[in-house]
């Protein structure tokens, strides 16, 4: 076997020709199924009619006689599309057919008025070639050989072109993609060879099968062309969509994007940098598992929208679920930037029914900032307070605007003469270093500073020897606990002006009292407190205000603690 195969290979002509497949039978037409580079020419071929009358008509039209001059009309003899008008041809998606009675009418020449085609070898020579190709079918081993041999039989016998198995191998390689669609086994392992070869060898001699095979191959290769072009356009589409995803990811907000930029972290969250934010988050993380959500004002006053009550999958829009860290940042951004929930939901790419966790912070933040002991305060007393070494707390009132309540009673109670607006009022107390160590509940704006101080509960924290620093309005000396002194700027009273030492004293107190205003300024920098608070926010306003106050404590000291220890 080995030797015989070698012999076949050695016998192959040295000058290699490409397989051209079908050729047109018309004089002067050199159309072939394959181009010389082995790729399909894309031309369509039509077999001669089988009925004698029609067949002879075609022969007359192409000026050739059946059985003369090496011209024998077989079931494989064909004419190319160049000889038919458009109306002759029915162009189906996978295959072209001739309409009934269609005859060649274009590009027809006689033998005399064209240069004859290169002469073909005699039938005897051709039949010997066929035999040699058939031998190679039997003998060839290894991938591709059987197929090529099979094809060579098709071409040699039916189309009379001169080729060797290796020619067709080349053709096979160049049309590999399209050819793999044909439902014939292309490759065999050597163990299967005997079996498979005998199976297909039995099929080969049937010319009709071969014709069928060729037409099928033609239509499949066309189909493959179409498919590969649609694959190409789909690839383009994938690239486009991948770019879209990249672009959309860029437009979504994420903490990772700002984490490296301290000023951005401060702008979005109020924390001075991502390190401090992550430290606080890590502290909270174990407690974040089981929480009640704050669904925004809507859920407080009204029932949820239908989609908010259904499962996650039924909600419109995105179904993205935020990580705990993202939720934490979400809440911080809501407070710091005062963004609407819908706006935040869009930035984070989540459904608008999303929720924030304000109550969680309201309960978890205060334990982080217990009211500091007298000892602690005095130990950290900044140098600026050297004239007021017993200062325990500096207090001030602050107001936030609210919508006008509907009830007349509430309207008058929230009216602030000082601000000329309906307000909520709170008492805020800082340590000498500027930390917010006390935040009262919100009271209706009409409450006086004295009443606010008394009812806030701050007095319970004060001890013998403490000093409370406040603004002039805090006329609270008589309500302070025993042993607690008050430090407020001197009153002018009925006098025209303060004495010189009094002016000096006022300035000195103001220079340290200013820190409570700076601390409140930090709180007001949480823009959720901007403008006029909606009445719908009222149920969570205490929580919001208190959390904003305590969050400012994660910022650096307003006044550096004493370096002396
Ligand atoms: Zn032609």
Image: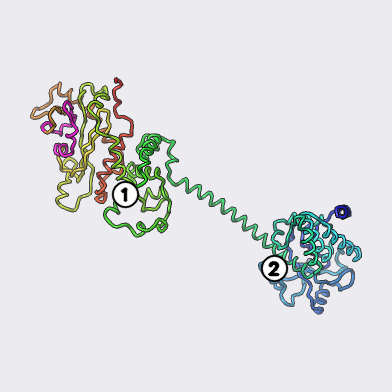
Q: SS of the residue at dot 1?
A: loop
Q: Which residue is mark 2?
A: 95
Separation (CA) of disc 1 from disc 2 = 67 Å
Q: Earlier in the sequence, mark 1 or mark 2?
A: 2
- Residue 557 vs residue 66, the one in the foreground: 557
- Residue 37 can be seen in this image: no
Q: Which residue is mark 1?
A: 294
Q: Residue at x 54, y 50 (%)?
A: 242
Question: Which image quarter: residue 135?
Answer: bottom right
Q: Residue furthest bottom?
A: 53
Q: Position of residue 49 (x, y in %)?
A: 78, 75
Marks 1 and 2 in Cβ contact (< 8 Å): no
Residues rendered magenta in the picture: 450-478
Question: Which image quarter: residue 118?
Answer: bottom right
Callout 1 crowding tier (Cα within 10 Å): few <14, some 14–19, many ≥20: some
Image quarter where ligand 1 lies: bottom right
- Residue 375 can be seen in this image: yes
When the figure is inspected, residue 552 is found, relative to residue 356, above or below; the finding is: above
Quadrant including the N terminus: bottom right
Q: Residue at x 14, y 23 (%)?
A: 502
- Residue 501 vs residue 244, the one in the foreground: 244
- Residue 535 vs residue 68, the one in the foreground: 535
Q: Residue at x 82, y 78 (%)?
A: 52
Please state if 445 lies on the left or on the right of 521 as rendered.
left
When the figure is inspected, residue 358 is found, relative to residue 132, above or below; the finding is: above
């Amino acid at each position: 076997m080995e030797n015989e195969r070698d012999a076949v290979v050695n016998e192959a002509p040295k000058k290699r020709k490409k397989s051209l497949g079908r050729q047109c039978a018309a004089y002067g037409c050199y159309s072939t199924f394959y181009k010389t580079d082995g790729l399909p020419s894309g031309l369509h071929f039509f077999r001669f009619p089988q009925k004698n009358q029609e067949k002879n008509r075609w022969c007359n039209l192409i000026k050739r006689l059946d059985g003369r001059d090496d011209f024998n009309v077989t079931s494989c003899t064909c004419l190319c599309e160049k000889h038919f008008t458009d109306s002759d041809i029915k162009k189906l998606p996978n295959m072209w057919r001739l309409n009934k009675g269609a005859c060649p009418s274009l590009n027809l020449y006689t033998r005399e008025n064209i240069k004859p085609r290169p002469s073909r070898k005699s039938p005897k020579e051709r039949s010997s070639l066929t035999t040699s190709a058939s031998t190679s079918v039997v003998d060839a081993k290894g991938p591709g050989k059987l197929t090529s041999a099979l094809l060579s039989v098709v071409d040699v016998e039916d189309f009379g072109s001169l080729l060797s198995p290796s020619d067709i191998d080349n053709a096979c390689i160049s049309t590999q993609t399209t050819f793999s669609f044909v439902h014939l086994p292309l490759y065999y392992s050597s163990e299967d060879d005997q079996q498979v070869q005998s199976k297909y060898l039995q099929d080969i001699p049937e010319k009709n099968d071969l014709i069928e095979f060729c037409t099928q191959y033609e239509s499949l290769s066309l189909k493959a062309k179409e498919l590969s072009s649609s694959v190409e356009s789909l690839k383009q589409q994938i690239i486009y969509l991948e770019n879209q995803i990249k672009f959309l990811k860029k437009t979504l907000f994420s903490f990772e994007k700002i984490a490296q930029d301290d000023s951005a972290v401060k702008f979005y969250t109020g924390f001075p940098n991502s390190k401090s934010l992550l430290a606080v988050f890590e502290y909270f993380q174990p407690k974040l598992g089981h929480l009640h959500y704050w669904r925004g004002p809507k859920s407080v006053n009204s029932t949820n929208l239908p989609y908010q009550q259904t499962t996650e999958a039924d909600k419109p829009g995105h179904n993205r679920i935020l990580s705990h860290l993202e939720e934490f940042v979400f809440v911080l951004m809501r407070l710091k930037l005062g963004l609407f929930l819908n706006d935040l939901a869009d930035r984070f790419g989540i459904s608008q029914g999303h929720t924030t966790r304000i109550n969680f912070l309201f309960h978890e933040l205060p334990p982080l900032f217990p009211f500091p002991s007298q000892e602690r305060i005095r130990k950290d007393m900044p140098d600026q307070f050297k004239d007021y070494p017993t200062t325990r707390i500096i207090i001030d009132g602050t107001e936030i605007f609210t919508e006008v309540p509907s009830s007349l009673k509430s309207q008058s109670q929230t009216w602030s003469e000082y601000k000329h607006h309906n307000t909520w009022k709170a008492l805020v107390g800082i340590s000498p270093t500027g930390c917010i160590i006390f935040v009262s509940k919100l009271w209706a704006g009409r409450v006086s500073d004295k009443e606010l101080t008394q009812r806030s509960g701050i007095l319970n924290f004060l001890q013998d020897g403490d000093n409370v620093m406040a603004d002039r309005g805090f006329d609270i000396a008589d309500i302070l606990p025993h042993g607690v002194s008050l430090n407020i700027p001197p009153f002018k009273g009925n006098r025209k002006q303060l004495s010189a030492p009094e002016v000096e004293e006022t300035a000195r107190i103001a220079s340290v009292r200013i820190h409570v205003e700076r601390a409140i300024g930090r709180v007001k920098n949480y823009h959720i407190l901007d403008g006029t608070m909606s009445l719908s926010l009222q149920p969570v306003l205490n929580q919001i205000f208190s959390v904003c106050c305590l969050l400012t404590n994660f910022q650096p000291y307003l006044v550096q603690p004493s370096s002396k220890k």
